[in-house]
Each structure stands twice: as C-alpha cells, then as structure tokens.
Image (cartoon, grey):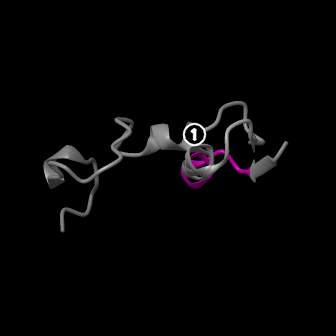
C-alpha cells in the first residue's frame, strides 16, 4: 500500500491532501499532520473572519482598515 504524508494543515497542506487523494491510486493512505488542534484554523481569520477564499465581490467597504487606499 502506498502512503503519502503531508506536514502542515494550512491552506496549502489541505490543498495538497485533496490533490493527492484525487491523483493517488485507490487504497492509498494519505495522512495530514498539523501541530495545532485543528487543520485550517488560520483560514478562519481570512476575510475579516468570513473565510473568503476567492475575490468575488471584493470592495474596500468590506474590510476594516485605517488605510483606505
């Protein structure tokens, strides 16, 4: 049985795990290791807590910042 180990459960690690799962032959074991209690936790901080993963509808009024440029 083939095994794949991915270190880091951030956005890149999760994307790598998904890509590996889609590309690997059936029966391949994929293990994603993260030092924090939850994988992807930092994604929750993106988009001012709204976890935006794309740039659809981005407007300065949607973000809290002192620099409006």
Where residue 66 sits: x, y (%)? 27, 58
Q: Quadrant of the C terminus?
A: bottom left
Residue drawn at x 25%, y 48% is: 63
Residue drawn at x 66%, y 45% is: 9
Identify the residue position indicated by label 1 in the image: 40
- Asked if residue 69 is positioned above or below residue 23 in the image, the reply reads below
* Residue at the far front in the pictured view: 26
* Of the pair 66 and 49, the residue shown nearer to us: 49
Q: Quadrant of the N terminus?
A: top right
Horizontally, residue 3 falls left or right of residue 62, namely right
Residue drawn at x 58%, y 51% is: 23
Where residue 7 sits: x, y (%)? 75, 52
Q: Residue 8 colored magenta?
A: yes
Q: Which residues are magenta?
A: 7-14
* Of the pair 27 and 37, the residue shown nearer to us: 27
Where residue 27 sits: x, y (%)? 74, 36
Where residue 26 sits: x, y (%)? 67, 38
As helix, strand or loop, the secondary structure at mark 1 comes to loop
Quadrant for residue 41, please give it.
top right
* Residue at the far top in the pictured view: 37
């Amino acid at each position: 049985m083939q095994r794949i180990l991915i270190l880091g459960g951030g956005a890149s690690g999760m994307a790598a795990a998904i890509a590996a799962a889609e590309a690997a032959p059936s029966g391949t074991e994929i293990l994603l290791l993260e030092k924090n209690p939850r994988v992807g936790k930092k994604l929750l901080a993106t988009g001012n807590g709204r976890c935006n993963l794309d740039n659809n509808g981005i407007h300065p009024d949607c973000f809290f910042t002192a620099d409006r440029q």
